[in-house]
Amino acid sequence: MAPSLEERAAALAAAPVPGAPSPPAAATARSRARTAAARPPTTGPLKSPKATGAAPARRGASRPAPPLEVPRGAGARPAGRVVLGIDPGTRVVGWGALVVTARGPRMLGAGVIRAGDGELCGRLGLIRKELDLLIQRFQPEALAVEEAFAHKNVQSALRIGEGRGVVLSCAGAAAIPVHQYPPATAKKALVGHGAAHKTQVAAMVARRLGLAEAPGPLDASDALALALTHVIRARL
């Protein structure tokens, strides 16, 4: 017996529509769509830390220490025979260092030690410290110092003698031979006569050492003159 019209209509309503997802499948599809929309788009493959070549920084990692700086001439003796000349005093002390080379003497350095106008013992102590540093720096094989001489001013002569004592004690502590020359001897060795003025001595010092001008002040050039006198007299 053929179905009635009502039965056919009920069967068509209950039949699934072709291509339509089932209710559970539709819910799954909507969930996947929401997840895909929330995920940020990618333009290429993700790089790992190894691919970038940058290692992560570690806290507390130590950096290499900078190289130590060694003071100039602190432990290395200049090549050649070194002579240190000292023009003694208790307020200003002149010094000059020479090195004897195959081409003749050349200046290593020159200057003055200024002890100021304080108490005498303090000035002498400062001079001693500075002279010790000069000896450590240049490591001379000989020290030339002005010899004691008769002075019109007794107090000046005593002060020079006190300054000479500091110089001699420094040389003795370092076991350096000391050679003493009167001012007139140094002037005669360089200028040709013992009554030359300090400026004449300074000009001859510059000429002998091949300098454009004499190092100042005159206390420094006097010290270089003493060192040059020893080079000439000892035929170094």
Image (tube, rainbow, N blue to C red):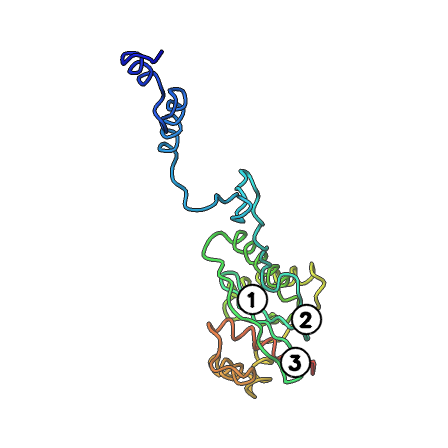
Sequence order check: which comes first, mark 3 or mark 2?
Answer: 3
Q: Residue at x 67, y 67 (%)?
A: 77
Image-based side of 178 in relation to 22, left or right: right
Q: Quadrant of the N terminus?
A: top left
Crowdedness near tag 3: few (<14), some (14–19) or many (≥20) residues, C-alpha within 10 Å = few
Q: Which residue is mark 2?
A: 142
Residues 189 and 24: in front is 24
Q: Which mark is residue 101?
A: 3
Amino acid type for the residue under numbered disc 1? Pro
Which of discs 3 and 2 lies nearer the camera? The answer is 3
Instruction: State the SS at label 2.
Output: strand
Between marks 2 and 1, how big is the CA–CA gap?
A: 16 Å
Task: List x then y, in percent, for residue 145.
Answer: 61, 70
Q: Are marks 3 and 2 in contact (CB under 8 Å)?
A: no
Q: Name which quarter of the figure residue 232 lies in.
A: bottom right
Instruction: State the SS at label 1.
Output: loop
Between marks 3 and 2, how big is the CA–CA gap?
A: 15 Å
Q: Which residue is mark 1?
A: 88
Residues 184 and 234: in front is 234
Sequence order check: which comes first, mark 1 or mark 3?
Answer: 1
Q: Residue at x 53, y 71 (%)?
A: 110
Amino acid type for the residue under numbered disc 2? Ala
Which of discs 2 and 1 lies nearer the camera? The answer is 2
State the residue lying farthest toward the front. Answer: 1
Crowdedness near tag 2: few (<14), some (14–19) or many (≥20) residues, C-alpha within 10 Å = many
In this rendering, the answer to whether 207 lies above or below 2 is below
In this rendering, the answer to whether 124 lies above or below 61 is below
Crowdedness near tag 1: few (<14), some (14–19) or many (≥20) residues, C-alpha within 10 Å = many
Which of discs 1 and 3 lies nearer the camera? The answer is 3
Sequence order check: which comes first, mark 2 or mark 1?
Answer: 1
Instruction: State the SS at label 3.
Output: strand
Task: List x then y, in percent, for residue 219.
Answer: 50, 71
